[in-house]
Amino acid sequence: MFQKVVDKYNMEHPDGYQIELQNITRAGAGSGYIDKLNAALTSGNMPEIFTLDGPDVASYADSGVIQPVESVVPQSFINGFTPSIIQQGTFNNEFYALGYTDSAVGIGLNKNIIKYLSDDVKALIPATNEDWTWDDMLEVARAIQALKTNPATMNKPEVKNMEVACDWLTSDITKGAYETGTYFLTPLLWGNGGSLIGPDGLTLDGYFNSEKNIEALTIAGKFFKEGLVLPTEPLKAFYTQKAGMCILGFWFISEISSNYPDLDYMTVRYPKVDINYDGLYTPSGSWAFVCSSSVDFSSDYGKAVGEVLQALTNDESSKLYYEMNGSVPSRKNTVSVIDLNSADPRANEAWSVLAYEIANTNHSRPVTKGYPVLSELWSRDVILAIGQAKTDDPNQIRDIVEKAMKKIQKEYDRF
């Protein structure tokens, strides 16, 4: 998809600077790409434009590897990105990263399971255009789990097959994929007005351990304590109908449409703790184009680099990326190209929910130069620790949070 944009640009500028595209395989957890990037950095052979995952922008900006782009990318163009993409690309009030894709998350519910719920519980499940709370979701999860012991439903084939009420992909954390925990569950805090770190990207105390966060984590603790979520859940639990509900990433949609025709599911918005919270709170963010600090933006060459950055991330390119790769649009004008009239009504409903979040409620992950350690210890030493302790005791949760914060602080002291 990038090659199409490159070819078009080069054809339109036959006498100007040409773009050369190099693809690097992201082996394993992406180490192949990062290793190549670091080698180029060490040898002084950095490309003018390269890609970074959103959470990595702050550390590269702070170290001077990349530079802000406002001098060659108009503010009007920057304003065309969705709010969360602007948020993830901004460090110290300067804009560094032009996101070429976004992401979004909803809540999936297995219709073959929830059809057995009582009417009063079904009433807690919102319409696709309504908000709901974590307390609502907790009650629905409890009712789903209770189907396993209710004589009227326990022998129903769908209920017998179900092994857990909710799938939060927490098993990814046990395998070292800490980012899953950060991506899926930091919004638990945001939807209560909390955060992992202060606006300066450095201050932990008073934010990481705030009472807003403890309140939100206590709700998560109830899911673990009551066995509604398992630290290690069955593989592909929601896909195989072993979970009645899940936190549903946008990538679930095509996977289910392609491989799981028997899964009849609905999608609703990601919940809030505080139903009256009206800020950004749904999980988002993805990869972006950035510019090496070696480029002189005052030169003709530097101005051409700015033009290329725009060509790679404009509305037309964003539309192309969606059509070719299912990439979630990162530009406000492109959200409307999401297909809500496909042959799969399940997918249409899911995308309608995610399209709303992309345009209105998506929040970027913390912009901080210490992001890797923050993400790892938040997922492993807070979320997973609460899950393994199966606790909803606020004091115990506060102790877990304080211990994790002290570990993170030791790393942040370097900054």
Image (tube, grey):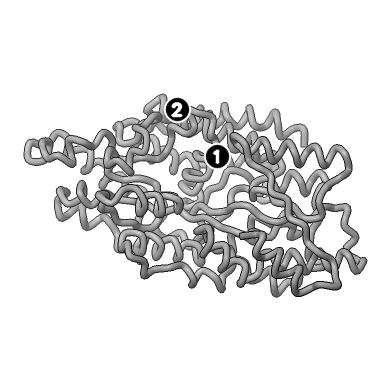
Quadrant of the image containing the C terminus: top right
Find residue 328 and report its horizontal and vertical position in percent: 52, 60
Which residue occupies 80% across, 73% down?
13
Total marks drawn?
2
* Circle 1: element type: helix
Q: Is residue 13 above or below residue 25?
A: below
Q: Nearer the viewer, residue 199 or 9?
A: 9
Q: Nearer the viewer, residue 286 or 390?
A: 286
Can residue 50 be spotted in the picture? Answer: yes
Residue 386 falls in image quadrant: top left
The residue to which callout 2 is attached is: 396
Q: Is residue 161 found left or right of 8 in the rendered image?
A: left
Near mark 1 (Cα within 10 A), the count class, few <14, some 14-19 or many ≥20, is: some
The residue to which callout 1 is attached is: 179
Which residue occupies 91% across, 66% down?
298
Separation (CA) of disc 2 from disc 1: 24 Å
Residue 81 falls in image quadrant: bottom right
Q: Amino acid at mark 1?
A: Glu
Q: Is residue 316 above or below residue 231?
A: below
Quadrant of the image containing the N terminus: bottom right
- Residue at the extreme right of the image, as rendered: 299
Q: Is residue 63 above or below residue 68?
A: above
Find residue 262 and report its horizontal and vertical position in percent: 25, 49
- Residue at the extreme left of the image, as rendered: 152
* Circle 2: element type: helix
Near mark 2 (Cα within 10 A), the count class, few <14, some 14-19 or many ≥20, is: some
Q: Nearer the viewer, residue 275 or 23?
A: 23
Can residue 136 be spotted in the picture? Answer: no
